[in-house]
Image (cartoon, rainbow, N blue to C red):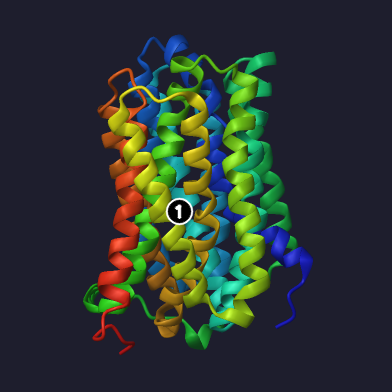
Amino acid sequence: MQIRPSLLVTLGLLSGLTPFAIDLYLPSLPAIARDLGSTIEMAQLTVTVYLAVFALAQLFMGPLSDMLGRRATIGGGLLLFCIGALGCALASHMETLFWARIIQAVGGAAVAVTVPALVRDLFERDHYARVIGLVMMIMSLAPLLAPSIGGLVVTHASWPWVFITLLGIALVASVLFLWLIPETLPSERRHPPHLGRVLGNYRELLRHRLGMGYLLTGAGTFASMMSFIVASPYVYIVLHQVPTSWFGVLFGANVAAAMVMTAINTRLVTRLGAERLLRLGLMVQMLAALVLLALALLGTPPLWAIVLATLLNQGMVGMVLGNAMAAYMTLFARMAGTASAFSGAARFGFGAAVGSVVSLAHDGSARPLLLGMALSGLLAGTSYWLLCRAPSASPR
């Protein structure tokens, strides 16, 4: 199928809804905690609650997209996402904010889990890796721009306007989706609603050694990114007293590095192959993880050291995630929605777990951030070399 720019932009915006939902309000976390009479730890947990529900919901939404089709699943998800964004804007208590984030996460899961399956309907392995890479590059504009936009909004208005902005972005994505993207899963290829078959598919995914290797590789890399997202507002804004407006610049530098690596990956993947580029990205990521681990052991590293080590680590996300996902999805073409759900649930579930530990380990230092990123990155590399590079790790 021809790769149309309008298709890529729409898919990128749809994929960017959850990054927007997470990153847009990061600069306002201190203000939310203050205005709702809560603590920074509870405000940070609204991020990880979103991720946890997002991960769990994907396990249901993926098979649902294989049963109902891609348009119905994404359309319903967009409706829930918009309702949740409005609920967040109107929240006057932390409990209300938590419930609104749960609704928003369910909608975000329906959208996010269906986009890779939709692309898998249209493209094969290396072309899939290229298209997903391009979608991720466009999607990366969300975390690149979101903290700066959120910082500007919270500087000139109150934090509920951050969620009004998020609602506006979701409405634009909805219009583009309904206008430009057709159904990609014909009725004859849809799965009947059969619980036993769904559970059997998940059992097959769990028992697939090579698939689990790629899955854990992506999950570790994603958890490293989540550690940064959850803890960086405190480390930068509170601990190192970076102005809110400059936080977006420092945060965005990591996203820009990931975008550059994604762009390089999309240019090289059809010539060098996703597997070779995945190995290269993992080697650099593990080197960065060792640097972060050394900084954590130092006690109180300077801001410039944290920024540079994080930049090296997060830049590799652009190369590792797309290639790991492409390798994983290629193994399960006949149940792309379920495989995408399982992959997304594993990534976001593990990311939520690590993010929660990082939040609850808050000790007034940068150590939880550094350790979370370092150990997650080391897990990603170790999983690949144990499960994907072993002689017995071959497609079934």
Which structural element holds mark 1? helix
Place of residue 94 in the rendered image (x, y in percent of width and height, measured from the top left): 38, 20
Q: Residue at x 36, y 52 (%)?
A: 377
Q: Quadrant of residue 4?
A: bottom right
Nearest to the observer: residue 122 or residue 222: 222
Q: Residues within 10 Å of mark 1 (few under 14, many from 20)?
A: many
Quarter of the rendering occupied by the C terminus: bottom left
186 sits to left or right of 235: right
Residue 305 in sight in this render: yes
Q: Residue at x 38, y 64 (%)?
A: 343
- What amino acid is at disc 1? Ala
354 sits to left or right of 81: left
Quarter of the rendering occupied by the N terminus: bottom right
Q: Quadrant of residue 100?
A: top left
Q: Residue at x 63, y 23 (%)?
A: 246
Residue 15 vertical placement versus 294 (above, below): below
Residue, disc 1: 109
